Image (spheres, rainbow, N blue to C red):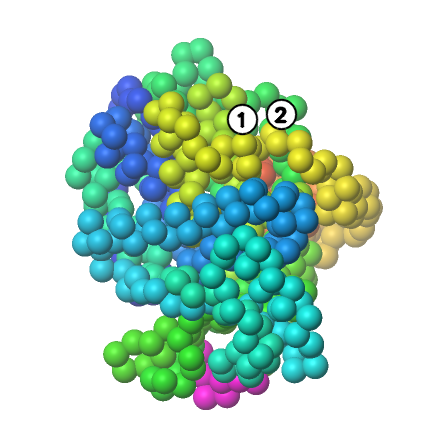
Amino acid sequence: MDHTSHWRKTSVLPRFGRLEEDLTVDVVVVGAGITGLTTALLLQQEGLSVALVERERCGGVDTAQTTAHLTAVTDARLHELLSRFGPAAARQVWDAGTAAIHRIAELVRTLDIDCGFKWCPGFLHAATPDEGPALFERETAAARALGVAAEYDDAVPLFQVPGVRFPRQAMFHPLAYLTGLLRAAAAGNVQVFEDTEVQTIAKKPRQVRTAHGRINFGHLVLATHNPLTGLASTLRAALLQTKLALYTSYALGARLPRGRLAEGLFWDTAEPYHYLRAAEGRNQTYAIYGGEDHKTGQEADTPAVYTRLEAKLRTFAPDAEIDARWSGQVIETNDGLPLIGETAERQFIATGFSGNGMTFGTVAGMMAADAILGRPNAWRQLFDPHRKKISSAWNFLRENKDFPVRLVRDRLTKPEAKSLRDVAPGEGKVVALGKSKVAAYRDTRGRVTACSAICTHLQCVVAWNPAEKTWDCPCHGSRFHPDGRVISGPAEEPLPRVSATTGRPLRSRHAAVR
């Protein structure tokens, strides 16, 4: 089954070559999603030279998998933000999201980007008709206390249940938007390199090293969703990871007759919650419906997740014609706010966007530009990666309570198969070869790729994701291609290739990121 996102099916980004020489720039940005591209463009507009380095294709990982809600409403409720941080900080969180939407709107206008940007309402609503109005009345009161525009609605459009209406939220086509940013950046003082994997990041000299070239830099921005260690100490990078939890979320794209759904953004109070983006086109309504989140690597029957999601979609849109299925990864933090700021001298990171990747990714680009240019920023302390407002200890224990269990259990559990003959075409299994556990994948032509099944982050045994055809780590959410290459961290090194006969290590074809 095809798992290409709707955005990838309907947009083609320009291509760029890999780095083939040594160069020197003011700033290196690693990662070319919305965070990296926004950062690069804003710095270029300020006259700085920038190298934008992407391991695969620009916009090809998390930004391509989004459901493209542009909203200042965070996963943490307004009344929760008030309780945790107080009114001034809670208002700052809202202002950050609003500023991001307006910055996107401004770039769409000034760069003349054809990405379907439009203003629309957003609705938080009850998950079932039996849910009462108390939560939504409380949320409306919190919004009023913060000076945020919001209205209680006892019958939210489409679902006819209690909820809160937030005006002036927005939607767009994220890859069409990135195409506009890319063209503007590349036309200026940004050098863009695709198929360029970072091997090492050196402190003296400050240098990013790849297989075919080196880049000397003054500042470094790690825009890789889950940040690399880079210039930070191993201990500091490890402590940062204790504040993060990685989840996989699923989405369906569907066509419906024009006017079939109320246009806007919707998300309910279920745990995990479901979300809907309904956009009116010339001849149809296009709906993106998502949810069914789980910790990455901890769902064995991933195809069944799509079945459950489709059943939920058909309760309110029985005539939906589904034409796309895909999943993405969201990163939660210990206190519900993103981690954006410096983790080492002149090294800037951004992560933990939860369900607000497009807005917080834009906020991160704005903050990175301010930090590098030495300008003050109102959100610096609020989103500081090393903030002490809420200890990460409780959340670390909650989110990682199964780590030691899985580490021991998975090492003792028998592999799924004793022979490569048990791996069918298009399938992956953990196979016992000699004394090794091998992550074996057989492609549709019958060829086998064998890697170590031990995640290179903290040594858990990876699991095969049959829907996405990836190896996923159930402990901390790292994801790998069938051939072991890293898709997303916290792992920075690929799964080592091993002999398909003995399970013994082969000389690695992959470079490690340090």
Residue span colored magenta: 315-322
Of residues 156 and 436, the one nearer the viewer is 156
Residue 80 pos. (x, y %): 65, 53
Name which residue type carries label 1. Thr
**Which of the labelled discs sits on residue 343, or is there none?**
1
Element type at mark 1: strand
Residue 91 pos. (x, y %): 52, 47
Residue 119 pos. (x, y %): 34, 64
Q: Is residue 103 magenta?
A: no
Name which residue type carries label 2. Arg
Callout 2 crowding tier (Cα within 10 Å): few <14, some 14–19, many ≥20? few
Most extreme residue toward the top, as rendered?
204
Q: Residue at x 76, y 47 (%)?
A: 398
The answer to whether any part of residue 387 appears in the image is: yes
User: Mark 2 and mark 1 in contact (Cβ < 8 Å)?
Assistant: yes
Residue to which mark 2 is pinned: 236
Element type at mark 2: helix
* Mark toward the start of the polypeptide (1 vs 2): 2
User: Picture quarter containing residue 177?
Assistant: bottom left
Q: Residue at x 43, y 82 (%)?
A: 261
